[in-house]
Image (cartoon, grey):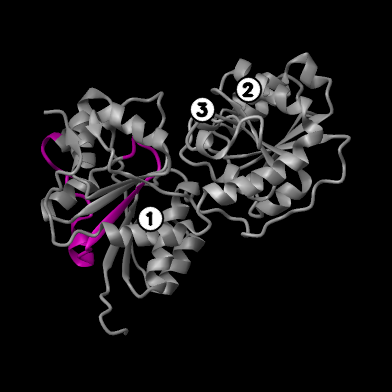
């Protein structure tokens, strides 16, 4: 051990409950790996699965202390009753007493996820930080949950967001001043020097939509509606949908059949090799209703592909409309159609615009986001234990 080195105890709690893994888990898990490699103690609290997920297995091999929590399977009425009599108000208390973290990092996949772990932290005097990966401006925290969510965010030693837009959603939902929060970058799954060859065939223009099939967030339904128009049916264009079922696959398949869009839209499923996707496709189309900082867009730009996207999350900061990509104001048929039409009219410029996109993203986005976040976590550790920070303020 180096002279003067102090091992810091960091714990991670992921709110991921539905899918086994997702893009929201990449930043905290890779930062955990970086901390372990630096010699720090890391403990992880994750919902129990039937099979050990490979990224968690890697962290275990690096020395992480893994704790598997089980969810209470009770109905909504009983759950409300338990909360009223303060049963289940301090989840994972034994884990926190064992881990004794200098800081707990709570990774929040979606802004409505349960944050009751923060109540346990406050009762024990454990400082915690919140990392939010996605927030929808279309779903508000309800009145009966307002105080609990507000206390969770107001009590954080530090708040991290992957976009300013998401921070503004939380500020609006909870009437809190979160101006001292930090904006952090998400990791990506392509190599730093990724330069997949441009597809040789330009007789059929191929777009890839890389996202889990989830209409509520990714809005593939809007994309299908745009492509049903006669002008798009008549053009040599095809969209490949890459991504696991996020709950809307059945609807997607039925809509493609109902409107005879099999030649236009091909469902390809999940693929682990993103660079291979871009060897076959000319551009990204991502019509999201909301995002944090979409990994698919970052990866497409790194690979030299033009993004055709909606103005959500970090898009306005990373994509210059009509310069290195095409931005729709929102996920509506009219606005997405306009962005796609502008892109189509300049399709013979896509390769050059993609090269510009690759250069732009490398200037504006961290190329070592996990290591950066690990450093920010260590910097957020309070100098001494605190029961409340008072850093995040509500109106007097």
Q: Secondary structure at mark 3?
A: loop
Q: Nearer the viewer, mark 3 or mark 2?
A: 2
Residue 347 left/right relative to 183: right
Residue 141 left/right relative to 370: left
Q: What residue lies at 44% left-to-right and 54% top-to-bottom?
A: 27
Q: Which residue is mark 3?
A: 289
Residue 210 left/right relative to 140: right
Q: Secondary structure at mark 2?
A: helix
Q: Which residue is mark 1?
A: 48
Q: Point out the image quarter for the N terminus.
A: bottom left
Front residue (pair 18, 155): 155
* Residue 227 tag number: none
Which quadrant of the structure image shows residue 8? bottom left
Q: Point out the image quarter for the C terminus.
A: top left
Q: Position of residue 366 (x, y in %)?
A: 50, 53
Q: Which residues are magenta?
A: 84-113
Mark 2 and mark 1 lie on one chain; the one further toward the N terminus is 1
Mark 1 and mark 3 lie on one chain; the one further toward the N terminus is 1
Q: Position of residue 299 (x, y in %)?
A: 61, 48
Which quadrant of the structure image shows residue 132? top left
Q: Which residue is mark 2?
A: 336
Front residue (pair 336, 243): 336
Q: Position of residue 263 (x, y in %)?
A: 80, 29
Q: Nearer the viewer, mark 2 or mark 1?
A: 2
Q: Secondary structure at mark 1?
A: loop
């Amino acid at each position: 051990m180096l002279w003067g080195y102090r091992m810091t105890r960091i714990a991670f709690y992921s709110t991921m409950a539905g899918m086994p893994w997702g893009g929201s888990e990449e930043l905290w898990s890779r930062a955990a790996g970086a901390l372990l490699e630096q010699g720090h103690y890391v403990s992880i609290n994750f919902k129990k699965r039937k099979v050990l997920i490979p990224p968690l297995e890697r962290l275990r091999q690096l020395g992480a202390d893994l704790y598997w929590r089980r969810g209470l399977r009770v109905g909504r009425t009983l759950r409300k009753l338990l909360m009223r009599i303060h049963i289940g108000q301090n989840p994972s208390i034994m884990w926190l007493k064992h881990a004794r973290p200098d800081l707990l990092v709570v990774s929040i996949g979606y802004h409505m996820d349960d944050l009751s772990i923060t109540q346990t932290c406050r009762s024990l005097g454990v400082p915690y930080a919140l990392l939010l990966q996605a927030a929808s401006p279309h779903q508000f925290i309800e009145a009966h949950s307002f105080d609990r969510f507000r206390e969770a965010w107001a009590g954080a030693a530090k708040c991290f967001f992957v976009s300013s837009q998401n921070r503004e959603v939380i500020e609006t939902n909870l009437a809190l001043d979160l101006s001292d929060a930090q904006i952090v970058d998400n990791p990506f799954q392509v190599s730093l020097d990724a330069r997949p060859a441009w597809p040789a065939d330009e007789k059929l223009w191929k777009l890839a939509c890389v996202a889990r099939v989830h209409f509520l967030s990714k809005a593939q339904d809007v994309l299908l509606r745009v492509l049903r128009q006669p002008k798009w049916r008549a053009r040599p264009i095809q969209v490949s949908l890459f991504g696991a079922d996020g709950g809307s696959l059945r609807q997607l398949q039925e809509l493609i059949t109902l409107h005879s869009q099999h030649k236009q839209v091909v469902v390809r499923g999940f693929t682990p090799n993103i660079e291979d996707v871009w060897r076959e496709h000319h551009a990204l189309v991502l019509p999201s209703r909301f995002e944090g900082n979409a990994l698919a867009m970052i990866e497409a730009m790194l690979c030299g592909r033009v993004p055709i996207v909606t103005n959500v999350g970090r898009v306005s900061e990373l994509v210059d409309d009509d310069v290195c990509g095409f931005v729709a104001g929102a996920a509506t048929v009219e606005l997405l159609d306009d962005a796609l039409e502008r892109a189509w009219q300049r399709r013979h410029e896509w390769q050059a615009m993609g090269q510009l996109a690759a250069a732009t993203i490398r200037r504006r986005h961290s190329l070592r986001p996990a290591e950066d976040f690990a450093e920010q976590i260590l910097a957020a550790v309070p100098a001494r234990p605190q029961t409340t920070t008072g850093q995040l303020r509500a109106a007097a």
